[in-house]
Image (cartoon, rainbow, N blue to C red):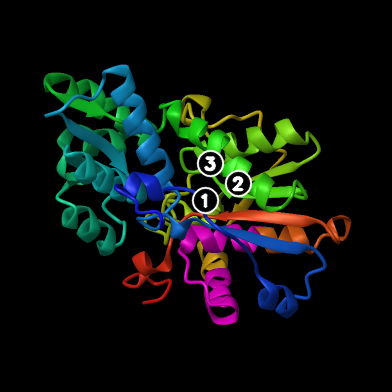
Amino acid sequence: MGKINKSIAELVGRTPLLELVNYEKKHDLKARLLVKLEYFNPNQSVKDRIALAMVEDAEKKGLLKPGYTIVETTSGNTGIGLAAIAAAKGYKFRVYIQDNVSKERFQVIQAFGGETIKLSEEPAIAKVLEETNGDFVAAIDALRKEVLSKEKDIFFVDQVSNPANPAIHEATTGPEIWEDTDGKVDILVANVGTGGTVSGTGKFLKSKNPDIKVVALQPGPNSLPSEANPEPEEITGVHPFEGIPKERVPATMNLDIYDEKFEVETVEAYTAAREAAKNDGILVGTSSGAAIYAATQIAKRPENESKTIVAVLPDTGLRYLSTPLFG
């Protein structure tokens, strides 16, 4: 008898690894470049993993009960994952979302019945963001203290400090990569947003083989707001973790897990994502392009010839059709 699933919760994880064979040939790569296609999750991003994990962890701990509203701040994909899980489990959902994310993100969350509020529309958040030059961690703290503390019957997910975030990657993403490569993986490449993916996945893989190299990605200087360039094209969902005060680094980012920091500019991420689409038929987002670009440069190093590199690709390119990536 066939298997019939009863909830989207049963569809999260077990995403495939794909070798970018045509891309490898185009760039004459001597290393093997594998990508983990997280858009095979039910709502097309790696954040489905943490959305489900954080909600179920809260339910087990009694922090989330029937009739409660789930609340989160996000650059988009976590909000989409949470909106879908909330709908499936019968909770209301409200998200405070960054203003500059693609319109598709707002539309998808609203389609699931979620309420979307731009960060600039919440005075407490807008004030902190202006005073701290966009410090997302500080903004979340302000939301918690000045807004959510006055409400009842809510569960604030708080992905940047929720231990269920990196834990689910240690329990699922890492083991999946290890199993699908038969343990033959030499380098892991992953973006840093909250840091959960690289921290949890890296921790598991290093527990199996301490010689595995973990490369963590952050935006290059030209892809971050500055006085000279206040509104750059950013890599959505990817944030600095080095070169900033430690108190601004999410608690979910393990600063001891990675072996190398790699910086990627938005234009480089665009180029790699477009090439992957045209050469291997995968349509992925800007952060995925960043992972492909970084993995490519690492693969070109002489010392990495014949090694296996796994890059985690966070989401689908369908959420970027209105952006400069494909627009």
Q: Which residues are magenta?
A: 271-294
Crowding around mark 1 (Cα neighbors within 10 Å: few <14, some 14 to 19, many 20+) is some
Q: Which mark is residue 25?
A: none
Which of these two is toward me, 320 or 203? 203
The residue tagged 3 is 197
* Label 3: element kind: helix
The three-letter code of the residue at mark 3 reads Thr
Q: Which residue is mark 2?
A: 176
Q: Residue at x 48, y 45 (%)?
A: 239
Q: Amino acid at mark 1?
A: Arg
239 or 158: nearer the viewer: 158
Mark before the other along the chain sequence, 2 or 1: 1
Name the amino acid, label 2: Glu
Q: Give the Cα distance between marks 2 and 3.
A: 13 Å
Image vertical order of residue 278 relative to residue 128, above or below: below
For the N terminus, the image quarter is bottom left
Tag 2 secondary structure? helix
In contact (CB < 8 Å): disc 2 and disc 3: no
Q: Secondary structure at mark 1?
A: loop
Residue in the foreground of this view, choosing between 321 and 5: 5
The spot of residue 312 in percent (x, y) is 57, 53
**Viewer-proximal residue, 294 or 49?**
49
Tell me, yes or no, if residue 119 can be seen here.
Answer: no
- Can residue 291 be found in the magenta stretch? yes
Q: Are marks 2 and 1 in contact (CB under 8 Å)?
A: yes
Main structural element of the magenta stretch: helix, strand or loop?
helix
